[in-house]
Image (cartoon, rainbow, N blue to C red):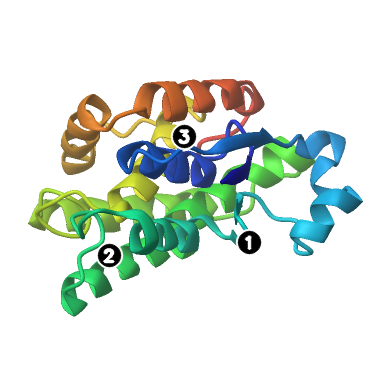
Amino acid sequence: MDFYHIEFSPPCHSVRLLAKALKLQLNLIKLDLFKGEHLKPEFLKINPQHVIPTLVDNDFVLWESRAILIYLCEKYAKNDALYPRDPKKRAVINQRLYFDMGTLYQRFSTHYYPQIFHEKPVPEGTFKQLEEALEFLEGYLGKTAYVAGDSLSIADLSILASITTFKEAAGLDLSRYANIERWYAQLSATVAGHDEICVQGAQKFSSFFANAKQE
């Protein structure tokens, strides 16, 4: 399977974590957005929407990391541990994936990315919105050991990749979120590939955040 990725992208990291958990071999193809490699004709032929990550599994092409996570589980997982077949458990996992995409990581990018990529002023109120998203996550983890229940799921992998970037790239202080800190400490010590994929990838991103405002 070909996997088009960016080294410092949390959504890319989550797919790589899952591939490692499922013992799948990905052919990693690194794209440089700053050189416009995602806009070259050969990539546009694969993905006209030119977004990353993109997975090519023989003649099947898929993008959006959370969709890729679900696809890999449904096609290649030997059991349903990371994405249970039970409708209610699966629904909660899906909700947490959408929470990461549409609220948690979205609010992080809304606050930081205009600053670091476009040198624009900090949008008003965006850091408070990010803090609110972290409070939501703190609440989830106050009720269950993992973000979507009492066992590890693909929702944890997705959110772990996001939180690692918050901490390691942006230097966000999460010490006041005790449940997140507990969960992060556990997963960072137990999820295979976390350091080499998420931490090292996020550290390559950290220079962009040197002058970013965290308020």
Mark number displayed over residue 93: 2
Amino acid tagged 1: Val
Judged from the image, the secondary structure of the residue bearing numbered disc 1 is: strand
Of badges 1 and 2, nearer the viewer stands 1
Q: CA distance from mark 3 to mark 1?
A: 27 Å
Of badges 3 and 1, nearer the viewer stands 1
Say whether residue 185 is left or right of residue 143.
right
Amino acid tagged 3: Thr
Q: Position of residue 107 (x, y in %)?
A: 50, 55
Mark number displayed over residue 165: 3
Query: Front-most of 1 and 211?
Result: 1
Q: Residues within 10 Å of mark 2 (few under 14, many from 20)?
A: many
Of badges 3 and 2, nearer the viewer stands 2
Residue at 52%, 39% in the rendered image: 26
Q: Is residue 119 visible?
A: no
Q: Position of residue 147 (x, y in %)?
A: 22, 54
Say whether residue 156 is left or right of residue 166.
left
Q: Residues within 10 Å of mark 1 (few under 14, many from 20)?
A: some
Q: CA distance from mark 3 to mark 2?
A: 21 Å
Amino acid tagged 2: Ile
Badge 1 vs badge 2, beta-carbon distance below 8 Å: no
| Quadrant of the rendered image containing residue 50 | bottom right
Judged from the image, the secondary structure of the residue bearing numbered disc 3 is: helix
Residue under label 1: 61
3 relative to 171, above or below:
below
Compare marks 3 and 1 and give the one earlier in the sequence: 1
Judged from the image, the secondary structure of the residue bearing numbered disc 2 is: helix
Q: CA distance from mark 1 to mark 2?
A: 23 Å
Query: Front-most of 122 and 150?
Result: 150
